[in-house]
Image (cartoon, rainbow, N blue to C red):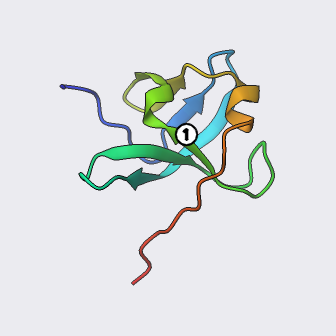
Amino acid sequence: KGEVEIRRASEVTSSDGHGLGKVDGFLVGDDDAITHFVLERGHLWGKREVTVPISAVANVYTDAVSLTLTKDEVGDLPSVPVHRGHG
């Protein structure tokens, strides 16, 4: 699609202009396509991981991602268990 790639440590901003944190990782579906990105832990919503669906991304810039969701909407997202490969 010629999209700009979402990078780790990109700043994530909600549609209402709040800095939500940084991209901390990705969840990949069965077809190796990224389905969600993970917000860094321990930010606005305590210590749970917040996983944001790629469909909620409005724009991707070189070191920043903006969402179509407000801060409150992101806080209401279901927390998807994140299984990261650690060896």
On screen, residue 17 versus residue 5, left or right, reads right
Q: For this rendering, which residue is in front, 44 or 69?
A: 69
The amino acid marked with disc number 1 is Val
The single residue placed furthest to the left in the displayed view is 2
Q: For this rendering, which residue is in front, 30 or 12?
A: 30
Could you tell me residue 10's position as x and y percent? 48, 39
As drawn, 53 above or below 47: above
Residue that carries the numbered disc 1 in the rendered image: 52
Q: Which residue corresponds to the image point at 43% horizontal and 53% vertical from the top-left?
A: 27
Q: Secondary structure at mark 1?
A: strand
Q: Residues within 10 Å of mark 1 (few under 14, many from 20)?
A: many
On screen, residue 46 versus residue 87, left or right, reads right
Could you tell me residue 15's position as x and y percent? 62, 17
Could you tell me residue 53's position as x and y percent? 49, 37
The single residue placed furthest to the bottom in the displayed view is 87
Could you tell me residue 82's position as x and y percent? 54, 62
Q: Which residue corresponds to the image point at 34% horizontal and 52% vertical from the top-left?
A: 29
Q: How many marks?
A: 1
Q: Which residue corresponds to the image point at 67% horizontal and 39% vertical from the top-left?
A: 77
As drawn, 63 above or below 33: above
As drawn, 52 above or below 57: below
Q: Which residue corresponds to the image point at 81% horizontal and 52% vertical from the top-left?
A: 46
Q: For this rendering, which residue is in front, 13 or 68?
A: 68
Q: Quadrant of residue 42?
A: bottom right
Looking at the figure, which quarter contains the N terminus?
top left
Q: Quadrant of residue 2?
A: top left
The single residue placed furthest to the top in the displayed view is 16
Q: Quadrant of residue 16?
A: top right
